[in-house]
Amino acid sequence: MEERKWIEQILAGDVQSFSCLIAKYEKMAYTLAFRVMGNKEEAEEVTQDAFIKVYNALDTFKFESKFSTWLYRIVYCTALSALRQQKIFTDYDEARPEDLTEKEMDSAASLLERNDRREIISQVMSLLAPDEAMLLTLFYLEECSMDDIHQITELTISNIKVKLHRGRKHFYEKLQQLMKTEARSLL
């Protein structure tokens, strides 16, 4: 495992090896921070702070879990701390799926078939509550197991399942809202 080698080299004084860890995980760390913070600049700051914490605590990593799980846990906790300091909590409006007509649903489906799926998914994720976006990102995009998510967030497995279910539901509702708006602008 290359991570173990890098960590051992870092602990032996080779600071350059830390850049290898950063290069491997910076995108996902940033994505996770962004899902919690909802702001590019704040996510960048959280990511930097988290990597500093990782560097300073590297000697406490015992290889009992995956390094990525340990890292994402630090990123997640750093983001939550920053969010608490800012006292930012978001609410979302409830969507009503029955508001969409059959024609709008067909239009939304064809819109998704275009090459901009990733952009649409990103837009929808930005409309979700930060904890839902973060869990969906970990589970679907990063393909973390329930146990990994439990280790990162310290939520119970049953709570993770409930939050993922709600997150998928809210994702679908926000997607419908976005597609309805897109359909109106196309007509």
Image (cartoon, rainbow, N blue to C red):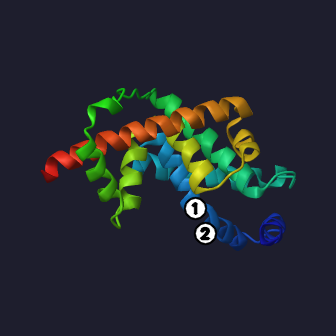
Q: In the rendered image, is residue 59 in sight?
A: yes
Q: From what the image shows, is residue 46 above or below residue 28? A: above
Q: Residue at x 61, y 49 (%)?
A: 138
The quadrant of the picture occupied by the N terminus is bottom right
| Residue with the mark numbered 2 | 23
Rendered location of residue 58, percent (x, y): 77, 55
Q: Are marks 1 and 2 in contact (CB under 8 Å)?
A: yes
> In the image, what residue occupies the spot 48% across and 35% down?
169
Q: Which residue is mark 1?
A: 26
Outermost residue toward the front in this view = 102
User: In the depicted view, which residue is nearer to us: 132 or 80?
Assistant: 132
Query: Of helix, strand and loop, which one carries label 2?
Result: helix
Q: Quadrant of residue 119?
A: bottom left
Q: Is residue 100 left or right of residue 172?
A: left
Residue 128 seen in this snapshot: no
Which residue corresponds to the image point at 76% horizontal and 72% vertical from the top-left?
Answer: 14
Secondary structure of the residue carrying numbered label 1: helix
Q: Is residue 24 above or below residue 100?
A: below
Q: Residue at x 57, y 61 (%)?
A: 26
- Residue 106 versus residue 93 in the image, above or below: below
Residue 103: x and y, percent? 23, 46
Badge 1: few (under 14), some or many (20 or more) residues near its Cα, within 10 Å?
some
